[in-house]
Image (tube, rainbow, N blue to C red):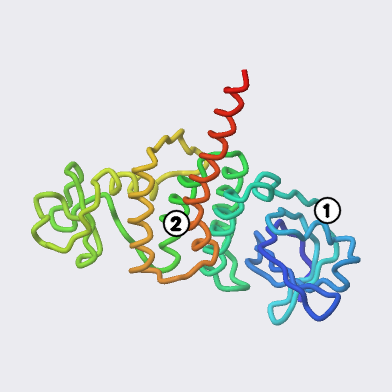
């Protein structure tokens, strides 16, 4: 048991007994911890313990059992993420991946910083799909998947179009495509972009404009990688997979309203 101050992100909360709550917070200094909040509805911390809220907290960390909050000196919610269904879905997915990638009570400041920067970019309305691609690819190593999309597993050439082989757990250049007739048959641009995303620093994220068609191809490829190498099921991901149809409906609705508005003048 130790009294500490640390930054953290509220991952989720759930009711415990009738009046109390358990709040899971990813702390910068002590990893993910479950905090007990007594009489949560009447607690002075109630408004600060909503999902997607950054905290500066003082509390008691217990390595065995629940931890406790003594004070919260600063609470900053992600306002856009909390107000936009698409942003909230993508943010929930990144939080879910971080949750399963890191065991509870394990320190991982780099993952904490990576998650926070990713959420910051979504909050700043940077393309959330691209941010998610980068996060998914770079976090794979924490599940034990060390993949290299930058060179051929046979000749190590980097200057030719590549395809991915699950048989060899890496890429084949076009000179070695016949080594695996069941290779992925992925657009070489997808492989190139995945390699770029693997090495990309979110602190220096360039402006990236990808066509919807290319995004769909990358999405299919990364989903296949996760199915084969990772095997985790995140509830928010299933929701995201169903959002494309809703996005099309919302776009058509807005377009229809604009058209009708124009017809009135």
Left or right? Give the position of 61 relative to 257.
right
Question: Which mark lies nearer to you, 2 or 1?
Answer: 2
Mark 2, residue position: 136
Q: Residues within 10 Å of mark 2 (few under 14, many from 20)?
A: many
Q: Quadrant of residue 122?
A: top right
Instruction: Name the residue nearer the viewer: 100 or 111.
Output: 100
Q: Quadrant of residue 222?
A: bottom left
Q: Residues within 10 Å of mark 1 (few under 14, many from 20)?
A: few
Mark 1, residue position: 73
Question: What element does badge 2 sit on?
Answer: helix
Quadrant housing the C terminus: top right
Q: Position of residue 227 (x, y in %)?
A: 37, 68
Which residue is depicted at the point 45% across and 70% down? Answer: 232
Left or right? Give the position of 33 relative to 149.
right
Which residue is depicted at the point 18% across and 60% down? Answer: 183
From mark 2 to mark 1, how far is it between C-alphas?
32 Å
């Amino acid at each position: 048991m130790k009294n500490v101050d640390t930054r953290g992100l509220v991952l989720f909360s759930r009711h415990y007994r009738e009046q109390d709550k358990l709040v899971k917070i990813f702390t910068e200094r002590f990893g993910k911890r479950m905090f007990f909040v007594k009489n949560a509805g009447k607690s002075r911390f109630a408004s600060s313990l909503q999902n997607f809220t950054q905290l500066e907290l003082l509390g008691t960390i217990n390595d065995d059992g629940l931890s406790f909050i003594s004070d919260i000196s600063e609470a900053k919610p992600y306002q856009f993420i909390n107000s936009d269904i698409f942003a909230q879905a993508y943010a929930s997915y990144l939080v879910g991946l971080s949750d399963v990638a890191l065991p509870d009570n394990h320190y991982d400041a780099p993952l904490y910083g990576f998650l926070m920067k990713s959420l910051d970019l979504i909050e700043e309305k940077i393309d959330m799909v691209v941010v998610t691609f980068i996060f998914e690819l770079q976090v794979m190593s924490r599940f034990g998947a060390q993949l290299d999309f930058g060179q051929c597993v046979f000749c190590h050439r980097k200057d030719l179009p590549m395809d991915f082989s699950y048989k060899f757990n890496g890429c084949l250049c076009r000179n070695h495509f016949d080594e695996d007739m069941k290779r992925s048959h992925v657009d070489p641009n997808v492989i190139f972009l995945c390699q770029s995303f693997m090495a990309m620093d979110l602190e220096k994220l360039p402006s990236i404009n990808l066509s919807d068609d290319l995004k769909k191809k990358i999405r299919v490829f990364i989903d296949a990688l996760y199915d084969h190498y990772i095997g985790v099921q995140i509830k928010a991901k299933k929701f995201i997979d169903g959002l494309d149809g809703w996005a099309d409906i919302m776009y058509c609705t807005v377009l229809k309203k604009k058209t009708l508005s124009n017809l009135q003048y």
